[in-house]
Structures are given as C-alpha cells and as structure tokens.
C-alpha cells in the first residue's frame, strides 16, 4: 500500500441471512481482533439456490498513513463465525519518490523482490519468479548470477595494457567490454561462457580467459597503447549488471630544455625559453628555488607566451613557452628551472646573473668594460647594454680593452 493513496481490501465469505462480513485489526495491547474503523465499505450479496446462505463480498477502502504500518488485518464472518488468514499492512512512504521524475524505478523499502515506479499514483511492481531487484542496475536480476567488477588500469605510452572484467562465481552467458565515449558505447570484445571470444575492435591484439580462485577474469590486451586508448570502459553482464573503470595512458617523461642568456641586464627585458614534450593535459612552467625551503615553486615574475606543436599520434605535443621579465638586482643569484606537469620532468637549473646598469654610468656608447662576475666576459655600454663572451681559452683584459691568452707572455 502507498502512503496517502486509496487502498482496497476485499473480504468474501458464505453467510446465512443474518450474517455479515467485517474487517478486523489486531489490537496492539490485547492482541485481540476488533472491527476496524479506518475503512469505508461496500457490500455485494449473491444468494444461493437453497435460500439458506449467500456469498457476501465487501470492499473496504481507505487512504492510510505510516502510523498503520505493520497493522495486522483479517476478514471475519459473523454467522456462521469464520476468519480468513491474517495479513500485515506494508505502507510504502511517498517520500521515496521525492525529487525523482515520473517513471523512475526505486527499490521497495521492505522487499527485495519488489520495486516502486514513481508517479501519480505511485505503483508497486513485483519481479518475476526467482528474481530480485537491483537498484544500481534498475532491473530485476537472477540473484545466483555472477557479479561483475572492473578495476582501473594505467600504462605508459607504447606499453601493453590490460582491461579486465572480473566475475564472482555464478552463471553468465556473455560479457561485453565497451569503451564509453560520451553517450556512445563502442564494443571492444565479447566473452562467452563456452570459452570463446569475439573481438570487435582492431586495437585488441589478444584476449585471455583464466580462472583464479573460482572467479573468472576476462582480459582484453591492448599492445603499444597510445592516448587514443585512454578513457572509460564498461563491462556488461548479459543480465544487465555492469561495472566501469578508467584507463589512463601516460606519456613518458622527456628532456626539458631551458634556453636563456645567463647574463641579464638590470632593468632590460630578459627572455627565458622552456621546451618540453607533454600530453594533452600537460603544461610547461618556470620555477624558482625558494631561499628558505630550497624547493622550486612556480615563478610569478614572468609573463609567458606558449606555442604547442602536436605530434602525429595525438598523444603528445612539443610545448615551448617564452617567459619575459625586467628583473632588478634583488633577483641576482636566483636559481631557475623549467618543469613539465604531465608527464613530470625538469630541466637543468640555471642561476640568474644580473649585470648592474650602473657599470656604464658616465661611459660613452660602445665603451667596453669588464664583466663584474666573469673573467671571460665583457660588457659593451649602450642602449641596450650587451654582454659578450671571449673566444675559447681567452680572458678579458680591461686595461687592453681586449680578450687575451692568459698564458701568453705579458698577460
């Protein structure tokens, strides 16, 4: 019975001309049955041919609330005295359909073999014989059928990867493996209880069935996977049960390059280039070493512009990001490196060397002055100030305003 919806109980008995049929309920204190006052009634009497008795049917109707749940009822005839079997009222609360659309099927709160269809009115349905309701599947199933489960898998690009459906002991006819793309389920392979398989997808090069501890594991093997294999997969039992899991394909870590002039000029725009191979979710960032914790964190002192070049396999791309900033002397000695986020990889670490613009104070344009931190470099004053490096094995001689061989006589 549904809370608040009209319920009908029919009592039929054979009585004499003085007899009646009534509906009685069990008193919760005395356990005796007394005539129920919660129902209205309509009676139909059919006289028999011998005029001594008649068949009397009475319809009892009422809209019951939850307070009547568990009440025991029976029909009784008064003349002659007789009673029916006893039934127990089960009232389904209307709240189980709160927030649900009309036509939605929900589990019966008190029975495994029944379910409720939401609507106005709500309707109780019963599964076919020997079946029970599975709320997760929204269907009636054989309780003796195997349970299907599935685990998520991860593999590196180019490796092999297994998609496994596992079944608890029990019966099945077929199991299907599908890849879910939006609302579409693409079939990969079907397994059958006779031990055969039917491969649908070209990406599956081999399949295996094996029994472990009386459970059945059905394995689809993908060879040399790419990111196109990644996504959500579903195992479906022929009785409607299903389980899903996610397949992840990682792009292997690659070398990350950092390119810059290791000499930067105070107040002049500096550019640092980071290049790395990333997957479709990956990024390249510039990080600086924290002076207290020594950990590298993303630098906030640079603006950035990125260029992504996709590769042919759609799994990865080459990402180059240009970081630009005008740094002051407070950044001198800061350590920087480039990092990719997916896959995770890091470049070599560089240390910022900032040449103070004051070294050219009072000097004419194109004047060459010694580099403040390096013997093999020198600075050409002007707008902009430029840093030059001596040829291999030479050092700067400021008094001579030229690079010289440090081993030559007079040097």
Image: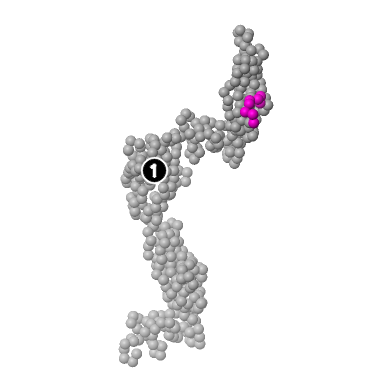
The x and y percentages for residue 343 are 41, 60
The x and y percentages for residue 43 are 65, 19
Q: In the image shown, does 191 or 93 lie closer to the viewer?
A: 93
Q: Is residue 74 above or below residue 19?
A: below
Residue at screen point 34% across, 43% down: 212
Residue at which label 1 appears: 166
Q: How is the image coloured?
A: one colour
Residue lying furthest front: 30
Q: Is residue 26 above or below residue 333?
A: above
Q: Is residue 216 visible?
A: no
Q: Quadrant of residue 69?
A: top right
Residue at screen point 48% across, 39% down: 137
User: Where does the magenta region start and end?
Assistant: 29-36
Q: Quadrant of residue 106?
A: top right
**What is the secondary structure assignment of the residue under circle 1?**
strand
Q: Is residue 367 left or right of residue 124?
A: left
Residue at screen point 38% across, 47% down: 163
Tell me how many marks there are: 1
């Amino acid at each position: 019975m549904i809370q608040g919806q009209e319920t009908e109980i029919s009592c039929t008995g054979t009585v004499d001309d003085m007899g009646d049929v009534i509906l009685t309920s069990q008193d919760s204190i005395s356990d005796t049955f007394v005539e129920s006052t919660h129902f209205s009634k309509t009676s139909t009497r059919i006289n028999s041919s011998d005029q001594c008795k008649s068949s009397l049917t009475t319809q009892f109707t009422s809209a019951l609330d939850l307070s009547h749940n568990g009440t025991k009822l029976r029909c009784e005839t008064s003349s002659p005295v007789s009673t029916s079997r006893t039934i127990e009222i089960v009232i389904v609360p209307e709240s189980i359909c709160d927030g649900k659309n009309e036509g939605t099927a929900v589990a019966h709160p008190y029975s495994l073999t029944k379910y409720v269809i939401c609507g106005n009115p709500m309707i109780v349905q019963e599964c076919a014989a020997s079946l029970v309701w599975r709320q997760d599947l929204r269907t009636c199933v054989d309780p003796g059928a195997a349970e299907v489960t599935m685990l998520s898998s991860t593999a590196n690009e180019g490796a092999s990867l297994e998609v496994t459906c596992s079944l608890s002991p029990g019966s099945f006819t077929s199991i299907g493996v599908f890849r879910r793309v939006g609302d579409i389920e693409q079939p990969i392979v079907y397994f059958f209880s006779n031990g055969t398989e039917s491969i649908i997808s070209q990406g599956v090069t081999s399949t295996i069935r094996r029994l472990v501890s009386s459970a059945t594991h059905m394995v689809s093997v993908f060879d040399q996977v790419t990111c196109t294999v990644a996504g959500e997969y579903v195992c479906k039992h022929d009785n409607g049960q299903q389980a899903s899991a996610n397949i992840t394909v990682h792009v292997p870590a690659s070398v990350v390059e950092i390119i810059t002039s290791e000499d930067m000029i105070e107040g002049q725009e500096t550019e640092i280039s980071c290049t790395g191979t990333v997957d479709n979710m990956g990024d390249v960032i510039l990080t600086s070493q924290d002076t207290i914790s020594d950990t590298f964190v993303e630098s906030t002192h640079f603006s950035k512009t990125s260029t992504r070049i996709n590769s042919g396999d759609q799994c990865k791309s080459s990402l180059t990001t240009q970081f630009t900033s005008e740094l002051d002397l407070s950044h001198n000695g800061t350590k920087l490196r480039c990092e990719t986020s997916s896959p995770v990889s890091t470049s070599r670490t560089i240390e910022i060397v900032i040449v103070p613009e004051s070294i050219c104070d009072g000097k004419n344009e194109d004047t060459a002055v010694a580099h403040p931190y390096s013997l093999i470099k020198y600075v050409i004053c002007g707008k902009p100030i430029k840093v030059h490096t001596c040829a291999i094995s030479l050092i700067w001689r400021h008094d001579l305003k030229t690079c010289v061989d440090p081993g030559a006589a007079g040097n």
